Amino acid sequence: MAPLPAKPAMKDRILETADRLFYLQGIRAVGVDTIAAEIGISKRTLYNHFPSKDALISAYLARRFVAPRPSDKSPVEQILGTFDSLERRFSGKDFRGCPFVNAVAELGEDKSVRKVAVEFKESRRLWFRDLLVQLGVRQADALATQLALLVDGSIAQDLVRNDPAMARAAKEAATVLLRNAGVKIRTPAPAQKHAAKKRQSRSAT
């Protein structure tokens, strides 16, 4: 008989619960009482691991600060694939936008929150820039900013319209920008387009 998987450490359980509640319900709306009750522990136990709600918020944002995974795909595929990933994410019932934008909207007066949000957005912009440099784009820095704006714009549009196709529209705009910058992008054959649509429809179900 295989051994039962070990339970997550209490600190991890607290952070996982805070992450879910902060993202789905809002940072201000969720107090430490709610988080402790959700786990079934006392506030004292929670404070033994996170001395304040501010410490828990910092840990939550640090947990969300994940670097893009290394990829064997070409720079173009990685750039445009970002928008495919967004479309799949938009189709999820639990999508509530960018956690860093949300945190600034709620806690903008907190300089530490704004600082980590800026660092996250800049890290994504620089990721685009590095890929554009690999493609030999001359104004890679400016184009990286434009691509980052397309990402954030599509997120905002999806939240307002509840329409995952906003990511597809952003991808089309990104394709135009890349071509205007001299990047060669192959147009998928009809069969490839059909297969891509099938994959997207499956991921949305």
Image (spheres, rainbow, N blue to C red):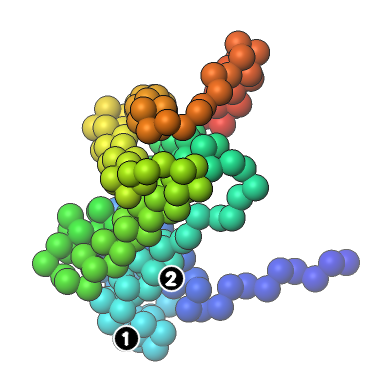
| Relative depth, front residue between 108 and 74 | 74
Q: Position of residue 82 (x, y in %)?
A: 46, 40
Residue 45 seen in the current view: no
Q: What residue is at 49 percent from the left and 42 percent from the top?
A: 135
Residue 22 vertical placement versus 12 (above, below):
above
Q: What residue is at 49 percent from the left and 71 percent from the top?
A: 13
Give the position of the C terminus as an image quadrant. Answer: top right
Q: Position of residue 191 (x, y in %)?
A: 65, 13
Residue linked to disc 2? 15
- Name the amino acid, label 2: Leu
Q: Position of residue 40 (x, y in %)?
A: 44, 72
Image mark for residue 51? 1
Occupied quadrant, residue 59: bottom left
Mark 2 to mark 1 CA distance (whole Å): 13 Å
Q: Position of residue 119 (x, y in %)?
A: 31, 64
Helix, strand, or loop for circle 2? helix
Q: Residue 143 vs residue 76: left or right?
A: left
Helix, strand, or loop for circle 1? loop
- Name the amino acid, label 1: Pro
* Circle 1 crowding by C-alpha within 10 Å: few under 14, some 14–19, many from 20: few
